[in-house]
Structure formats: structure tokens, C-alpha cells
């Protein structure tokens, strides 16, 4: 019901009561009822309006500052559970939003680190300054000292005048790294014998491999006589003398030797022999 507005006029003392009622200047029961009916109708209309959720005033999202907000329905429990278990980044969260590096940034940093690591691994200049003692080894100075000591020991084993034998042709100076050495070629070694002038001291040399030259032994020409003694003798010749027999010697001599090398060598095995001279 639509409320019909009433006209109210000022009470006129010059008119009668009935005239003022008719003129709308007096509150009567009918007018009060009309007001109450109007108030009731307005209350009904207001309640209906307040209950209307279909945007009766046609308010827009822009008018209430919601033009950037999607007007969606509330999610169901199943939808909510599905959303919370979604591991595919449904909110499109970026690496920077969680204080991390992106994949490309991580790849760049890892590539830089790999390059540095590869450079370090390939560094053969002892970047960690590792010492020989840390790896259970001798230092260069210690090795040089030990080699020097070894050379000293070898020097005592092979002093000047010592001989070195080998089936290999490597010179001792090359093998040991010290000394001056002279080859002994085509000679055997014999122990010194102070009582023999030919062998009285070390380093003396003698002997020869010259051939046995052919030569003639020429005795004096003449005769020698074989005489019979006092005993009984038998001479084979029919013309044997009664007491002696004469024989002529060879006047031209006897030839000995055949111009060949001596062949009375003992069994041997050849070896390289050096003598240290300095």
C-alpha cells in the first residue's frame, strides 16, 4: 500500500473547529490512523527492501571499489582439499617471492662455480700448498740428501782404482753419476803377488796373445858314441863294434812352432770391465 501524503495547515483561530478540521489544521482520529497506517506500510516496504539481496539499488562494483575483484563463490571442502594438495604451484608463486633464485639464475651461478671448480681441479701448481710430509713422502731436499748419501756409499764401494764388471755396456759414470772410468779391453785380471816382479803391484800389465812363431833349433854337427860297459851287451847290427858305436848328429837342425795363436785359454765369459781413474 502506498502512503498518501496529507496536507497540514496552520490552525486559524478566526475559524471554527469544524473549519480547521476540514482545512487540515486539527489532528483527528482518522488522520492519526492514516499516519499509523502509512508508518506500518512504510515498515513493511522497508523490511521488504532490506530483505532484497538482488541489488535493488543497482550498485556497481566500481561504486564500492570492487571492480578489480572477481566475484566468485565460496569453495567447497572438496575443492579446498584439492587446492591445498595441488603441488603444481597453483598460485604461480615466483622464486623471488620466496627469497630464492630462479632456474636460470641458479644455472648461471652453478656454471660459474663449476668453472671455478674445474679450474681448481686442473691446477697442478699445488694450490693447497701440500707438503711432502703431509702425504708421507720425502721432500726434494731430503731426497737429494739421501741420494748424496747413496752416492757417497757407492763412492766408497767404488773408490779410485776399483774395477766394475757388467754384461751391459752402460758406462759406470752414466750409471752412478760420478767418477772417471777407463775401459779394460781384452785382458783378464790376476791377483797381485809381491814376490813376482811381473805381478808385484796393481795395474801392472803383462802377457801376450802373439802366435807361437816357427823357428829352427840348430845343434853343432858331429858324432856321439855309445860304449859298451863291462856287462854282457847285445848289438843288433851284424857289424857292431866290439866295444862302442858311433852316431852322427843332424847338421841342419830341428824346426819347431807353426805360426798359430796359442790355444791354451781357460774357459771364459766376456764382460765389460771399467777401472775408476778419478
Image (cartoon, rainbow, N blue to C red):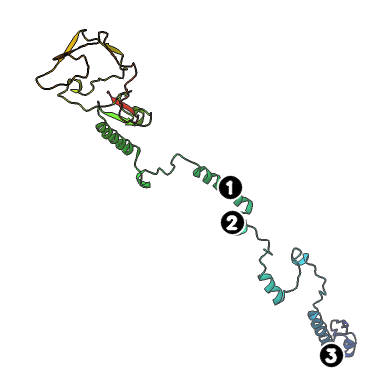
SS for callout 3 = helix
Q: Which label belongs to residue 111?
A: 1
Instruction: State left or right for residue 68 relative to residue 205.
Output: right
The x, y position of residue 199, in whole percent, is 20, 23
Callout count: 3
Distance between the alpha carbons at the discs numbered 2 and 1: 17 Å
* Front position among marks 3 and 2: 2
The x, y position of residue 47, in whole percent, is 79, 83
First in sequence, mark 1 or 3: give its number: 3
The x, y position of residue 249, in whole percent, is 22, 11
Distance between the alpha carbons at the discs numbered 3 and 2: 76 Å
* Front position among marks 2 and 1: 1
Instruction: Report the residue at 26% width, 20% height from top.
Output: 207
Distance between the alpha carbons at the discs numbered 1 and 3: 92 Å
Rendered position, 124 above or below 187: below
* Front position among marks 1 and 3: 1
Crowding near the residue tagged with mark 2, few <14, some 14–19, many ≥20 C-alpha atoms within 10 Å: few
State which quadrant residue 236 falls in. top left
Instruction: State left or right for residue 191 relative to residue 65.
Output: left
First in sequence, mark 3 or 2: give its number: 3
Q: Residue furthest front?
A: 238
First in sequence, mark 2 or 1: give its number: 2
Nearest the viewer among 276 and 211 is 211
Crowding near the residue tagged with mark 3, few <14, some 14–19, many ≥20 C-alpha atoms within 10 Å: few
Rendered position, 39 above or below 136: below
Instruction: Report the residue at 53% width, 44% height from top.
Output: 118
Q: Which label belongs to residue 100?
A: 2
Nearest the viewer among 169 and 23 is 169
Q: Which label belongs to residue 33?
A: 3
SS for callout 2 = loop
Amino acid at each position: 500500500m502506498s502512503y498518501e501524503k496529507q496536507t497540514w495547515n496552520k490552525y486559524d483561530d478566526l475559524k471554527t473547529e469544524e473549519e480547521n478540521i476540514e482545512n487540515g489544521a486539527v489532528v483527528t482520529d482518522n488522520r492519526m490512523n492514516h499516519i499509523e497506517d502509512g508508518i506500518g506500510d512504510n515498515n513493511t516496504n522497508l523490511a521488504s527492501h532490506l530483505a532484497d539481496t538482488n541489488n535493488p539499488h543497482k550498485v556497481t562494483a566500481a561504486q564500492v571499489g570492487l571492480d578489480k575483484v572477481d566475484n566468485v563463490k565460496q569453495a567447497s571442502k572438496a575443492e579446498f582439499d584439492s587446492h591445498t594438495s595441488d603441488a603444481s604451484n597453483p598460485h604461480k608463486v615466483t622464486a623471488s617471492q620466496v627469497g630464492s633464485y630462479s632456474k636460470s639464475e641458479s644455472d648461471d651461478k652453478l656454471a660459474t662455480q663449476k668453472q671455478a671448480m674445474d679450474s681448481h681441479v686442473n691446477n697442478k701448481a699445488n694450490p693447497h700448498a701440500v707438503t711432502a710430509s703431509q702425504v708421507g713422502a720425502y721432500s726434494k731436499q731430503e731426497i737429494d740428501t739421501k741420494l748424496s748419501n747413496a752416492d757417497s756409499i757407492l763412492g766408497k764401494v767404488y773408490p779410485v782404482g776399483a774395477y766394475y764388471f757388467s754384461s751391459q755396456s752402460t758406462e759406470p759414470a752414466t750409471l752412478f753419476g760420478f767418477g772417471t772410468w777407463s775401459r779394460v779391453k781384452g785382458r783378464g785380471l790376476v791377483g797381485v803377488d809381491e814376490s813376482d816382479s811381473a805381478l808385484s803391484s796393481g795395474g801392472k800389465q803383462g802377457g801376450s796373445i802373439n802366435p807361437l812363431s816357427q823357428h829352427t833349433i840348430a845343434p853343432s854337427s858331429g858324432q856321439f858314441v855309445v860304449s859298451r860297459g863291462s856287462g854282457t851287451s847285445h848289438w843288433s847290427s851284424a857289424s857292431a863294434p866290439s866295444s862302442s858305436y858311433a852316431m852322427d848328429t843332424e847338421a841342419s837342425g830341428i824346426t819347431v812352432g807353426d805360426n798359430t795363436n796359442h790355444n791354451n785359454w781357460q774357459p771364459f765369459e766376456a764382460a765389460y770391465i771399467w777401472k775408476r781413474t778419478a
